[in-house]
Amino acid sequence: MELQPTQFRPTPSRRLPLAFFCILTLLDTTVFVLDKMASQHASIVGGPFYLRVITQPWIWLAFTLGPLQLFTWTKILKRIDLSLAYPLTTISYLATMLVSQLVFKESLGPRVWAGAILISVGVAVLGRGQD
Amino acid sequence: MAASALALLAGCIACETAEQLLYRGSTGRAGLRKFGEFLAPAIAFHLIRISLWLWLLRRMPLGIALPLTGLTSVTIALAAGWIYHEQVGRRRWVGIGLVLAGFVTITAFRS
């Protein structure tokens, strides 16, 4: 029997690892929100800004989530191609915008949303590579 | 949009571009040179970028600052094309156009 070289490595499945994508989007969004909280709190309490930032629990929580993000991302890349996975990461831009409207009461307006959608689609198209 | 906020944003984008180019440059190198000339500066740019990012978030809503950082994918594509001769094909030009259009949509005419 002749073995094809492809049989020696796991073939990425065509099914989207949806659970991991949800976790990654959640992690990304959480880190951005934590950054904002750390920055905001550090501004309120006064004193040297960066000294205040690194004494915020929020920023340390954000730092600890970093390795988890990387772990989830590599799990996704084990299952599907980078060129398919990368475009989907821009969803976290839009998810974060939604959350910051709710949590920080930011009024973004239709123009910012339209621009953000253009940027997300553009980043996704760029990330899918040449052709 | 305040000039100082835009300057901070430009700093974030420049730092991340430099960081990614250094990671790209580090491939195919080994040992002390890889660390000293590529990885260490990349980590330094990363730390500067986080500092600028946190400062930027004082000035700009997160929901506006975050999508604007997407411009980094354009600067990386152009810089990698220039320095490493990575091809910028037709599809990438379309992506670049879309990101630029979105960036201008958000930043133009904003006081």
Image: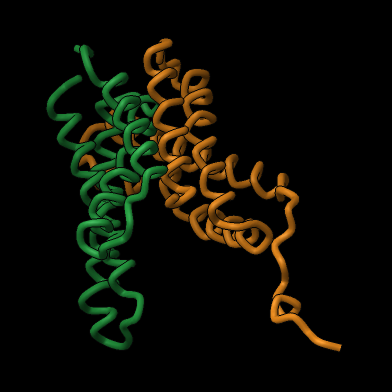
Chain colours: A orange, B green
Q: Nearer the viewer, residue A22 or B51?
A: A22
From what the image shows, is residue B84 above or below residue B12? below
Q: Report the quarter where the N terminus of chain A lies.
A: bottom right
Q: Nearer the viewer, residue B62 or A127?
A: A127
Q: Residue furthest left?
A: B3
Q: Residue furthest right?
A: A1
Q: Nearer the viewer, residue A115 or A65?
A: A115
The quarter holding residue A95 reads: top right
* Residue A45 locus on image (x, y percent): 29, 31
* Residue A98 locus on image (x, y percent): 52, 23
Report the residue at 29% width, 51% height from top: B76
On the question of residue A38 being in view, the answer is no
* Residue A36 locus on image (x, y percent): 39, 34
From what the image shows, is residue B18 above or below residue A92? below
On the question of residue B91 being in view, the answer is yes
In the image, A14: left or right of B53? right
Report the residue at 31% width, 36% height from top: A42
* Residue A117 locus on image (x, y percent): 45, 25
Q: How many marks?
A: 0
Q: Nearer the viewer, residue B62 or A114?
A: A114
Report the residue at 81% width, 87% height from top: A2
